[in-house]
Amino acid sequence: MTMAAGPLQEAEDDDVMSDINVVPLVDIVLVLLIIFMVTTSQIVHQVIQVDLPEAAHGGEVIDRTLALVIDPEGSLWLDGERVLLSDLNSLIPALKIEAEADGGSLQAVIAADRATAHGEVVRLIDTIKGLGVTSFAINIERITEERMRPEDG
């Protein structure tokens, strides 16, 4: 039994498609987002490589923060730029004045490679405290709970 095409079926074939399919657009945006996330994480990790010591407990960072890094070779970095310890005597007071003008305070986050001598870190802390930065933190990598458990012997 065949049915002849009636006026209703012919009218449907002649309609202009007015729907917009957004699935391909969403697919492209998600791919771009993934590419952005992967490349930015690679850029951040390529700046200065240090092997941070691990700890189970750490706090959050607030106010204007100075990022001080001592790399494995013993070089000092301030906010991504290589500096000498003596350069801090002129840089930190200017940054402290700027932070206080904005109504905040200045704190330092110190990251040192685990191979860095303890004395170098103490000398850095002593220098920044002498320049008026009384709030500072030591950057660490958090230990997962599995790694905190003692191994069964």
Image (cartoon, rainbow, N blue to C red):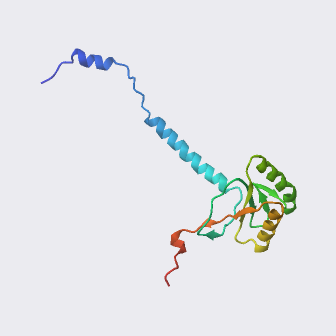
Q: Residue 40: x percent and y percent?
A: 62, 49
In the picture, measured across the screen, residue 58 lies left or right of residue 27, that is right
Q: In this view of the protein, which residue sits in the foreground, 115 or 11?
A: 115
Q: Is residue 43 above or below residue 10?
A: below
Residue at image x 58%, y 49%? 37
Q: Residue at x 66, y 53 (%)?
A: 44
**Name of the residue lying farthest toward the top:** 7
Residue 76's quadrant in the figure?
Answer: bottom right
Horizontal and vertical percent position of residue 117: 76, 73
Quarter of image, res 16? top left
User: The N terminus lies in which quarter of the figure?
Assistant: top left
Residue 122 drawn at (x, y percent): 78, 70
When the figure is inspected, residue 50 is found, relative to residue 38, above or below; the finding is below
Residue 138, by quadrant, is bottom right
Q: Nearer the viewer, residue 66 or 146?
A: 66
Residue 76 in the figure: left or right of residue 15: right
Check the image and report above or below for 145 versus 106.
below
Nearer the observer, 104 or 25: 104
